[in-house]
Amino acid sequence: MEFDTSKKVFAAGLILSLGLLDFIIPGVILVGFILTLIGLHSLSKHYRKPELFTNMLIAVIVIAIGVVITTAVFSIVLVHNYLTILEGPNDVFITMSKFATTLLTALVAFWIFIIVGAIFLRKAYLGLYGVSGVGEFKTAGNLVLIGAVLAIVLIGYLIILVGQIFAIIGAFELKPPQQAGTPETAT
């Protein structure tokens, strides 16, 4: 795949993976992740840095596993509590407290998955910064990691969104390897 095509596929994938259209067209995030990986795989070949793709792939897999596990746990607990309440006279307070405890545990586990995914996403973005000299990737990597840590208080998701916007801007500024400046020589 040509460099410009790789760059556009990567940028389009980043845009779609924001999930802003997922409420209108379900599955757009998944398409975005796939396009991001395809574009970055090709870019990593152009820059001769396979770890760019590897780090992004690990980030996507870790976050996907976190989403699946959290959704499964939440669904199972929700159905179990609903069936328990339907069975008859139980202590609703105990049932609901068990539900809240399990839900909180699942959310904390999801938060840990987000942080681990963000660590690998940051590595991918810092790698792109290293080979291209595009400073937006350094900013994106740092914001994504800070946002992941702060995701437990919800403001982190906004910071992650801003970080991803920086990555999108950076994707459009990428230059082929022979034209790219390193961080030391970039202006």
Image: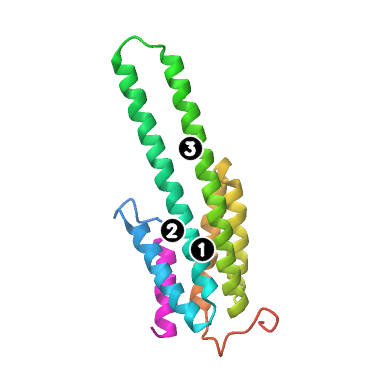
Residue at figure coordinates x 40%, y 62% from the top left = 33
Residue 165, labelled with which disc?
1
SS for tag 2? loop
Tag count: 3
SS for tag 3? helix
Quarter of the figure that contains the C terminus: bottom right
Residue 128 counted in the magenta span: no
Distance from disc 3 to disc 2, alpha carbons, whole Å, reads: 23 Å
Distance from disc 3 to disc 1, alpha carbons, whole Å, reads: 28 Å
User: In the rendered image of this protein, does residue 187 appear above or below residue 53?
Assistant: below
User: In the rendered image of this protein, does residue 130 appear above or below residue 68?
Assistant: below
For label 1, the crowd category at 10 Å Cα-Cα, with few meaning under 14, some 14 to 19 and many 20 or more, is some
SS for tag 1? helix
Amino acid carrying mark 1 in the image:
Ile
Residue at figure coordinates x 46%, y 59% from the top left = 60
Dot placed on the residue nearer the N-terminal end, 3 or 1: 3
Residue at figure coordinates x 44%, y 21% from the top left = 96
Please provide the residue range marked out in magenta.
1-18
In contact (CB < 8 Å): disc 1 and disc 2: yes
Q: Position of residue 104 (x, y in %)?
A: 51, 33
For label 3, the crowd category at 10 Å Cα-Cα, with few meaning under 14, some 14 to 19 and many 20 or more, is many
Q: Position of residue 23 (x, y in %)?
A: 33, 50
6 relative position to 87: left or right: right
Residue 18, labelled with which disc?
2
In contact (CB < 8 Å): disc 3 and disc 1: no
The residue beneath circle 3 is 106
